[in-house]
Image (tube, grey):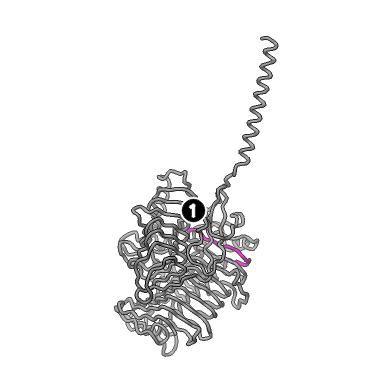
Amino acid sequence: MDKALRRGNRLKFRGLGAVMELGLILALAAYSARPVRAADPDFGPNVLVFKPSMPAAAIQERIDKVYAVQANSEFGPARNALLFLPGDYKVDVPIGYYTQVLGLGASPDDVRIAGNVHAGPARGNQALVTFWRAAEGFSVTPSGGVMQWAVSQADPFRRMHVRGDMALHQNNGYASGGWMADDAIDGKVSSGPQQQWIARNTEWGSWTGSNWNMVFVGVVNAPEGDWPKPAFTKIAQAPVVREKPFLQIDAAGQYSVRVPSLRTNSSGVSWHGGSTPGKNIPISRFYIARPDTDTAATINAQLARGKSLLLTPGIYHLTGPIKVTKANTVVLGLGFATLMPDNGAAAMSTADVDGIVIAGLLFDAGATSSPVMLEVGPGGSRARHAANPISLHDDFFRVGGAAVGRAAVNLRIDSHDTILDHTWIWRADHGQNQSVGWNINTSANGLVVNGNNVTVYGLFVEHLQEFQVLWNGNGGRVYFYQSEIPYDPPDQPSYTSAPGTNGWASYKVAGNVTSHEAWGLGIYSVFRRPNVVLTRAIEVPNNPNVKFHDMIAVCLANNGAIDNVINDTGGAATPNHIPNAPKVTNFP
């Protein structure tokens, strides 16, 4: 080959190599500049994370497998969370027991599900035991235009956008719900035979239906009419509330927990601006607990280091309390993570510090009686927290039902200014494993409040053996109360609180309290033994600053009665007289 030609080829290939090298350098630089998706945190086997790139059939298969376990598992051990990354999905999502369906966007509109997302009884139409399931943080375009959410207690429906109508019943079957907050429903909400309901900071096209006790707080376009016909209680603004924290993921694949800011005098949803105002806590600042490996000791060691806590789904057997001691700690449960104290201690306690948030947990009493299951602040707490209160969201309590359980008090609040945003405290009236009976699943009180200026939205407390609620602090406010008194007192002497007073009032404000106010209260009796009577549903001191609005008492059985709605007024709720259930508008 000619020397000149060979030299030219060498120069040509050298130039080509330089170009290729430069291209490789530019490609590597471009790749390194791209956001790198972080690996998903290890949420354990009970959390399924779905991506819009997954085939719809594969997603549907996994959803159906979870529902096959949870459809009828009222007292089963399984716990599940179904997480959807931002994007579009076309699937059917039935939600069974102990199942949380959660969108991971900053806004509910970041996760868009077209299809049926629904909850209700697996068989028949009666949803009276449709408990412990949640839909949070996504939008739904329901097939046929109507989303069915036929539920009773402990069924959070939060930060949702329904692009259509919504039915709170299944084919007009009975239900004993329920709760919604921070939701937008584009069309009509039909409550049907729902016995009671609370909606907080929600927006809809319209609402139809009323029964015994419907409460609307900070609701845009609340229905026309006022208590007692229809049984609507309307409060234009929520005076102070923090929305529930939620897990989210950003465009780079980074997980965090959004902690919403405190809202005062608010109405409507928090996320019209695209996301809920607040702060993000990176997932790296959370200890992610697993029920198969963690104990109270391992969790407390992480909390002491300043970590927040994310509890993945499952049942945590505890030999001592989880201790939340540092300000602004977030404790967030996924998939109805369940805390069970095994040795008669509390399941959880907090210090009297600012900004602790506890959300999404089920406290299930153990066989050895606990003096209290969740203690918010130690006895004698004195600090004020109005600027940054402790808040509790979707925390539920159970004594008996799945197994024998006992607890003197379920929830005690000693810290001032605490916000309680939806709870169901339940001494089981039915269950399995011979776990239910007057001397078996024993529990005196559901909620005891010793702190001042405590605010509660959505208070459901049922079947405790003494006062369902005992309020000792000043300045308390309660928006919506639902309570069934115990079914199973064996006789009147076993159910007498004081000489001349039959039974224990469901809602008791202590005699030393000088200020308290409550709106929308329904108390119901289902005594199973003849000649068992409750003297009064609500018992309060005669003080002009202790005020109650919109109360009803109903006898739902063939036995017993409630003689008075509040103190010695209101008239009697007697057997089978539901149409004439006594109602009181204001007291005093």
The residue lying toward the viewer, choosing from 134 and 87, is 87
Task: Residue lying at the far bottom in this picture: please name it.
Answer: 500
Q: Is residue 103 left or right of residue 145?
A: right
Q: Which residues are magenta?
A: 322-335
- As for residue 332 lying within the magenta part, the answer is yes
553 lies above or below 20: below
187 lies above or below 414: above
* Residue at point 32%, 64% (across, down): 126
Instruction: Report whether residue 444 is seen.
Output: no
- Identify which amino acid the numbered label 1 is placed on: Val
Task: Residue lying at the far top in this picture: please name it.
Answer: 2
Q: Secondary structure at mark 1?
A: strand
Across and down, in percent, residue 306 comes to 64, 61
* Residue at point 67%, 23% (across, down): 15
* Residue at point 66%, 29% (across, down): 21
- Image quarter where the C terminus lies is bottom left
Across and down, in percent, residue 95 comes to 40, 57
Across and down, in percent, residue 441 comes to 44, 73
Asked which quadrant contains residue 355, the reply is: bottom right
Q: Main secondary structure of the magenta part?
A: strand
143 lies above or below 245: above
* Residue at point 63%, 61% (across, down): 301
Q: Which residue is mark 1?
A: 47
Across and down, in percent, residue 495 comes to 41, 83
